[in-house]
């Protein structure tokens, strides 16, 4: 596994990256950095862990709004919230795991 050095909100992280996944990881880092920076720059929240959680929730919300290519969403029963597809759940789980790994020095978030 390749290691990639990245910066999120000015702090450096060394992340594990599968071969051929460098561009996808860099794009994910860019999205996380941008989401966290927007929250920080709004000025209301200062704690890094709170910023990270809010950014993760915002990104997960955006992900849930996008139809997953080639996946079927499990339909909800009447009156229930729709569920994420298995692929969406896996993607969200992977993003949260990467976020936990990247912010491991600051402590687990979830």
Image (spheres, grey):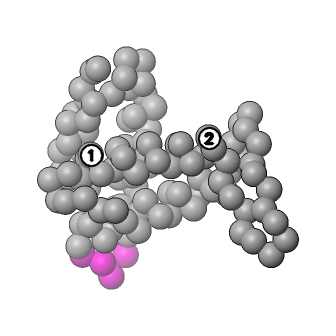
Residue assigned mark 1: 101
Q: Is residue 25 magenta?
A: no
The magenta segment: 40-46
Q: Residue furthest right?
A: 78
| Image coordinates for residue 2, horizontal then vertical, percent | 27, 21
- Disc 2 packing (10 Å; few <14; some 14–19; many ≥20): some
Above or below — where is 10 with respect to 61? above
Image quadrant occupied by the C terminus: bottom left
| Residue at screen point 68% across, 58% down | 83
Residue 109: name its quadrant.
bottom left
Secondary structure under the numbered disc 2 in the rendered image: helix
Mark on residue 49? none
Reading the chain from its start, which is encountered first: label 1 or label 2? Answer: 2
Above or below — where is 42 with respect to 9? below
Above or below — where is 15 with respect to 85? above
Q: Is residue 41 magenta?
A: yes
Residue assigned mark 2: 87
| Image coordinates for residue 50, horizontal then vertical, percent | 31, 71
3D distance between C-alphas at marks 1 and 2: 21 Å
Q: Residue furthest bottom?
A: 44
Residue 41: name its quadrant.
bottom left
| Image coordinates for residue 1, horizontal then vertical, percent | 29, 20
Q: Is residue 102 left or right of residue 60?
A: left
Residue 30 vs residue 75, the one in the foreground: 75
């Amino acid at each position: 596994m390749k290691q990639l050095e990245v910066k999120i909100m000015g702090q450096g992280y060394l992340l594990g990256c599968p071969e051929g996944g460098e561009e996808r990881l860099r794009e994910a880092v860019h999205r996380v950095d941008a989401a966290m920076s927007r929250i920080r720059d709004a000025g209301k929240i200062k704690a890094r862990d709170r910023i990270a959680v809010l950014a993760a929730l915002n990104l997960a919300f955006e992900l849930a709004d996008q139809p997953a290519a080639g996946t079927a969403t499990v339909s909800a029963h009447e009156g229930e919230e729709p569920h994420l597809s298995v692929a969406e759940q896996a993607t969200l789980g992977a993003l949260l795991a990467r976020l936990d790994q990247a912010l491991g020095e600051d402590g687990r978030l979830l």
